[in-house]
Amino acid sequence: SVAANVGGIDELLAGRPGSWEANYVHSLLFGTIGPDPQDLLRHRTEPIVVPLNVPSLVADLVSAGAAPDGVSAYDDVVDRVSEPDAEAHSEAWDLFSDTLADLLERYRKAYAAYGQTFTDAVLAYAQTLPELRDTYGGLLVPVAVVVEADPESDGEEVENPSEFDDPLVWKLWECAFRRVPLPVVAEPAP
């Protein structure tokens, strides 16, 4: 169960690769579970938690030049909104403030909708994995998605996984990422 909860035999033994103790533990687990690493998943006892940080995902893809056309990071769009001169009339400042508030609200809604669609995709894909299903078709362990959708968040509490993290979490995350189009938010008029 411990090996299943951390993502696999290699992940369990990561701190002691090549030691004689690790070889014995590996042999014991391999002999008990068998050669198919998918069989290990049936022994998982902890919930599978898939993290999604929408602002961080979008910002990373935009900065890497990998975002589809029309997808912009919130901070980049805010930076492009023209701030009035210090001597501008209060109406100009009110318009500026309203534009930023409207932009924030549109991004919050788009990111929340993306998070919900992403969650639905993760849960749907989890239902198709035979190694996660019991004999009645239900999930052996709960699957949850934790979403950060606030465009103004610092992104430290919820971090997107990498392919080097828990393999099952990565498999679920990557499938949803490939299936759900990134959110497109119209920019305000200049």
Image: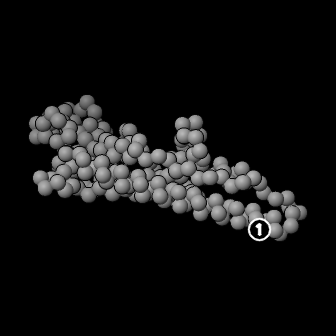
Q: Alpha-carbon neighbours of circle 1 within 10 Å: few (<14), some, or many (≥20)?
A: few
Q: Position of residue 159 (x, y in %)?
A: 45, 50
Q: Nearer the viewer, residue 173 or 37?
A: 173
Q: Position of residue 172 (x, y in %)?
A: 33, 46
Residue occupying image coordinates x 40% and y 44%? 179
Residue 20 picture quarter: top left
Residue 2 can be seen, yes or no: no
Total numbered badges shown on the rendered structure = 1
> What amino acid does circle 1 point to?
Asp
Residue 31 picture quarter: top left
Vertical comparison of 61 with 88: above or below: above
Q: Nearer the viewer, residue 165 or 93?
A: 93
Residue occupying image coordinates x 24% and y 47%? 128
Give left or right: position of 35 versus 176. Answer: left
Residue occupying image coordinates x 37% and y 38%? 164
Q: Residue furthest right?
A: 87
- For mark 1, give the secondary structure: helix
Q: Position of residue 54 (x, y in %)?
A: 49, 52
Residue occupying image coordinates x 72% and y 50%? 80
Give left or right: position of 76 versus 135. Answer: right
> Which residue is the site of mark 1?
94
Q: Nearer the viewer, residue 108 or 39?
A: 108
Give left or right: position of 176 versus 47. Answer: right
Q: How did the renderer colour the structure?
A: one colour
Q: Position of residue 24 (x, y in %)?
A: 16, 35
Residue 48 can be seen, yes or no: yes
